[in-house]
Amino acid sequence: MPFGGWGKTASCGCLRREVTTQRSTTHGYSYSSEYRTWGDMVARCTNPNHKRWADYGGRGITVCDRWKNFANFLADMGERPVGRELDRIDNNRGYEPDNCRWTDRSTQQKNRPSSAYAGLVRDPGTGQFRAKGSVT
């Protein structure tokens, strides 16, 4: 019997709903960009069926044990600034606090592993990559 027995109503039902919501809510970020970023990071590194597995988990990129918990990831990285993406400073190392940052897309793309640019050359005038042998 809730709230000490029959006849001792503590609320109209709102309290029960609020208590249930509080009990089942872990961090309040389930639909946030931080949570989606974290979930995709974990999936790329742990799920062989993920479309990017070969570039991450398949080549040994891991997520540190601490970051397998979203709350720890959020505590270490903070909220995602507008226009920023998760980036690994050293692309040969895994996702861990001292190797990750929120950065802009331009910086992130310049930080790709060199194999991502196989068959491309950087145009000295624009800094853009283009296929070898193509004329700009």
Image: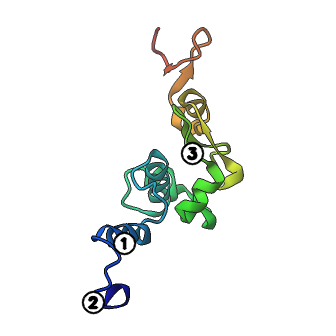
Which residue is the site of mark 1? 20
Which residue is the site of mark 3? 79
Number of residues whose C-alpha sits closer than 10 Å to that of mark 3, classed few (under 14), some (14–19) or many (20 or more): some
Q: Nearer the viewer, residue 61 or 82?
A: 82
Number of residues whose C-alpha sits closer than 10 Å to that of mark 1, classed few (under 14), some (14–19) or many (20 or more): few
Closer mark to the observer between disc 3 and disc 1: 1
Residue 62, image x and y in percent?
58, 60
Closer mark to the observer between disc 2 and disc 3: 2
Cβ atoms at labels 3 and 1 below 8 Å apart: no
Local secondary structure at mark 1: helix
Q: Rounded to the nearest whole Å, what is the CA distance between mark 2 and mark 3? A: 46 Å
Kindly tell me whether residue 85 is visible in this rendering: yes
Q: Amino acid at mark 1?
A: Thr
Label 2 vs 3, first from the N-terminus: 2
Label 1 vs 2, first from the N-terminus: 2
Label 3 vs 1, first from the N-terminus: 1
Q: Amino acid at mark 2?
A: Trp
